[in-house]
Image: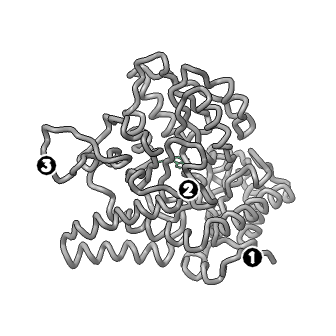
Amino acid sequence: MASPSYDLGQVRAEIPILQTHVPLNNCSQAPQCLRTRAAAETYLASWNEAGMDWDTWIAETEAARGEFAALISVDPDDVAVATSVSQATASVASGLDYAGDRRRVVASGAEFPTVGHVWLAQERFGAQVEWVPVRDGRVELGDYEDAIDERTLIVSACRGYYQTGFKQDIGEIARIAHDAGALLYVDAYQTLGSEPFDAPASGADFVASGNLKFLMGIPGIAFLWVRPGLADGLRPAVTGWFGREDPYAFDATRLDWGKGARRLDLGTPPILEAYVARAGMRWLRELGLEAIGAWTSLLGQRCVDGALDRGLHVLGPTDSDRKAPTTAIICEQSHEVELALRSVNVIASARGPVVRLAPHFYNSVDDVDRALDALAAAVRKVA
Ligand SMILES: Cc1ncc(COP(=O)(O)O)c(C=O)c1O
């Protein structure tokens, strides 16, 4: 039986829910593991015992910023700490100028709705949003070529499409955007943690992600990388005291700007979430993103092949090179199928017309096979 290059048994021993369930829902929420729980408890103990320890708590936020930076091969000063991808996107969008001829935002229907909504909200400031179509669960580069021109200010593209797992070629989209003089904003939430990702080499100008999916964290924290040099031109209207040059200057009458991406920091950082986020990201880096990528790709392909073998229908790519670990199986009553799976302790995630299976580094081949058997039975039951 296939196995990853790390010790799968040791990894699985750190995730208690695996004793009773088959979690395959990383596209929605990662499972709790011993180290993320311990990290949360460290904060709770500090709060309980010291009452208040801002120095340690802020240092922990900085450590989380550093861990995210290491994960995507960038400098921590080029990373902002956010509370969600919605907020990170809103901060970037509020720093752009939509008054000139170059005022178009090109985004695809594969964006997570929140990202599309933030861009649409800029229309009252002059932005014009152009939509690239989604066809059969994917977005074609030719459609980006058609949509992007000298009027495009920024292109907004997700690396992994939340519904089908379709992985976009960020390098090619960056080339098309930059040839037209436009910027590229990338939402990497559905892939970060499941594959190696070098942000500067990707060609993106901005990369955002939250932590609760393949980064093994919880809601309430997200990170945003800004290409060096670019942040200095941004004066985001969505701002706060941690975005100042010296957050502790306490001068309400003066608006200055922090160094690099730190100017996109907002209010009091998400401290508890930073503890958990750092522990999750650190584990992934310890195991190695290359090794995790190889294993999740194998499991992703097994989801597709196993689904097709069982007569199920897959939406989007069927080749693991073109997809995140997530596989989307078409079911008419996806929510009912999710509930039927839950009743046999298989955790999957319904989205619109599909149920998604999203394995990660701790899943086994047996997990995938068991989930597929249960899914095929659930689809027959609710049909
Ligand atoms: C690709 C992607 N982007 C953004 C989000 C939501 O981001 P947030 O809730 O942090 O604003 C999700 C949530 O599922 C997502 O899958």
Q: Position of residue 36 (x, y in %)?
A: 45, 72
Mark 2 or 3: the one toward you: 3
Q: Is residue 161 left or right of residue 241?
A: right
Asked if the residue at tag 3 contacts the one at tag 1, i.e. Cβ–Cβ closer than 8 Å, the answer is no
- Residue 339 visible in the picture: no
As rendered, which of 346 and 273 lies closer to the eye? 273
First reached walking from the N terminus: tag 2 or tag 3:
2
At 76% across and 47% down in the image, what residue appears?
Answer: 317
Q: Secondary structure at mark 3?
A: loop
At 72% across and 34% down in the image, what residue appears?
Answer: 140
Q: Relative to 265, is 103 above or below?
A: above
As rendered, which of 43 and 225 lies closer to the eye? 225
First reached walking from the N terminus: tag 2 or tag 1:
1
As rendered, which of 147 and 301 lies closer to the eye? 147
Label 2 and label 1: CA atoms lie apart by 25 Å
Q: Secondary structure at mark 2?
A: loop
Q: Relative to 73, is 184 above or below?
A: above
Q: What amino acid is labelled 1 in the image?
A: Ser
Residue to which mark 2 is pinned: 28
Q: What amino acid is labelled 2 in the image?
A: Ser
Mark 1 or 3: the one toward you: 3
First reached walking from the N terminus: tag 1 or tag 3:
1
Residue to which mark 1 is pinned: 3
Residue to which mark 3 is pinned: 250
Q: Quadrant of the N terminus?
A: bottom right
